[in-house]
Every structure is written in C-alpha cells, then in structure tokens.
Image (tube, rainbow, N blue to C red):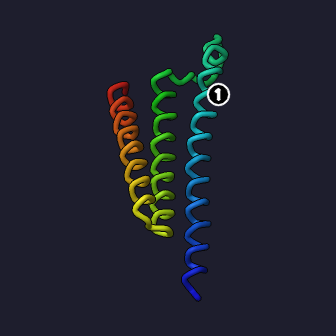
Amino acid sequence: MEVPHLVIILEYTAWAIAIAGIAIITWGVIRGTVEFVTIPLQRRKGFPIKPLSITQIRNQVGQHLLLGLEFLIGADVIRTVVEPSLEEIAILGSIVIIRTVISYFLNKEMNSSS
C-alpha cells in the first residue's frame, strides 16, 4: 500500500523539478532580453550603470539554459523510475542524448565567446 504513495510523491517531485527547469530557462531568457533591449538606453551619456556586452548577455542566457536543461533531465529520470518500461527508457535515453548534445554545444559556444 505504500508503493502508490511513493509513486505519487515521485510524480509530483518530477513535475516540480520540471517546472523549476522551465522557470530557470524562462527567467534567463527574460533577463537576457531586458538586458539586450536596454543596451541603447544605458549607453546614453551620464547613465551610471555600464551596459553588459552582447557576449555577456549570451553567456548569462546560456548558463540559464544549461541549468534549466539539467533540471529537465532530472525530472525525466525521476519519471522513468516511476514507470520503467522499455519504451520509457528508450525515450529517456533519446532525450538525455539530445539534451547532452545541446548542453555540450552551448557550453562550447559560451567558452569560445568569453
């Protein structure tokens, strides 16, 4: 009788982690957009704050994307533990490979641009 409760807890945990990942990515994109849009305003003479460069903004957004992807992978792993069918494991493997490739190239891009 305890197993269904554990499954429900894990399912809610996976959803919470996935929502956190989505929130991190969304926050990073919004923050990067605001920083990018305000560059011309900040460059006006006498403005007290030095604007971030486009490279710095890209790095910030990239860091948020990488962190958010890690959260989403974690949520997928938890979901697969809850329902470990062969199909679910294959889907998880595909998702992890795709997200790992994306993370690798994002990380490589961020390191080359800094």
Nearer the observer, 29 or 75: 75
Pick out the residue farthest to the top. 45
**Which residue position is annotated with label 1?**
34
Indicate the amino acid at tag 1. Answer: Val
Pick out the residue farthest to the bottom. 1
Q: Residue at x 44, y 67 (%)?
A: 84
Q: Is residue 59 above or below residue 68?
A: above
Which quadrant of the figure has residue 6? bottom right
- Is 45 left or right of 106, judged from the image as shown? right
Where, quadrant-wise, is the C terminus in this rendering? top left
Q: Residue at x 57, y 45 (%)?
A: 24
Measuring from the top left, give residue 25's x and y in whole percent: 56, 41
Crowd band around label 1 with a 10 angstrom C-alpha radius: few (<14), some (14–19), many (20+): few
Q: Is residue 89 above or below residue 39?
A: below
- Is 25 left or right of 67, judged from the image as shown? right
Which quadrant of the figure has residue 38? top right
Measuring from the top left, give residue 55's x and y in whole percent: 45, 23
Q: Residue at x 40, y 38 (%)?
A: 102
- Is 76 left or right of 109, judged from the image as shown? right
Where, quadrant-wise, is the N terminus in this rendering? bottom right
Q: Is residue 7 above or below residue 65?
A: below
Measuring from the top left, give residue 98's x and y in whole percent: 39, 42
Nearer the observer, 38 or 45: 38
Measuring from the top left, give residue 50's x and y in whole percent: 56, 22
Label 1: state its secondary structure: helix
